[in-house]
Image: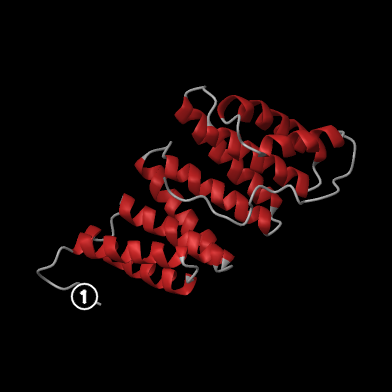
Amino acid sequence: REISQGVNTKDIGNTLCNLGYNYSNMKQYDKAVEYHTQALFVYREISQDADTEDIANTLFYLGVSYWYAKKYSKAEEAYQEAIAIYTNISATHEQAARSLYNLGRMYTNTKKYADAERSYLKALDIWRQLSQGADSVDIAKTLRSLGWCYCDAGMDRKAKETLTQALDITIKVDPENTVIVRIKSYLSTHSTDEPSQTSAHSEKQSSPQSAQ
């Protein structure tokens, strides 16, 4: 394919990416993948195969669309490529953290708990560096998801420790969040020695985190 001469090719890429985003919101995931793939081609043509943030962002959204379409291996590939570009741009790129967070949730959904743990911990490292030691909503959310991951994996001691941390931070930074009640309920009914009884606590594990 060739990009037409005399047009603003960056605008074409942006339009295609927006179309993909809109189709994803309408749950037409095959269409979303089609337009994001076209946008990726345009951005790569513009950059002459150099990595750019536009390419990384498009790969991020492609990962989201593949995840919703339950094409997990393709979603993983898109996210990993996006993460590599983001971290080349900045070691603490917040979109790298979001991509890692989404990977963690996808791995949890597909019961790849060790991979999920690694992804969440990498995301936490970035969020903590970005917050410079302060608590944040992103840190709280990632700890909650990591805690539920441990719960689903039957790692009850780690689940309780992590959810206790998550609860303390959530109360500080997001005190109106209804998940506080659920965490308190879980912690009050599970000792560190009890076997895991349910995976129903997952925090909307099927929904990827969008770019912000």
Name above or below for residue 37 compared with residue 89.
Answer: below
Image side of residue 170 versus residue 46, left or right: right
Residue 187 pos. (x, y %):
80, 34
* Residue 109 vs residue 28, the one in the foreground: 28
Residue beneath the point at 25% across and 77% down: 1
What's the image's color scheme? secondary structure
Asked whether the viewer can see residue 51, the reply is no
Q: Residue lying farthest top?
A: 133
Specify the quadrant that holds the C terminus. Answer: top left
Q: Residue lying farthest bottom?
A: 1
Residue 17 pos. (x, y %):
34, 62
- Disc 1 marks a residue whose amino acid type is Glu
Residue beneath the point at 57% across and 55% down: 207
Asked whether the viewer can see residue 83, the reply is yes
Residue beneath the point at 42% across and 73% down: 31
Q: Residue 164 is drawn in which quadrant? A: top right
Badge 1 local density, few (<14 within 10 Å), some, or many (20+)?
A: few
Name above or below for residue 121 compared with residue 36.
Answer: above
Residue beneath the point at 70% across and 40% down: 147
Q: Residue 188 is drawn in which quadrant? A: top right
Residue 93 pos. (x, y %):
41, 39
Residue at image mark 1: 2
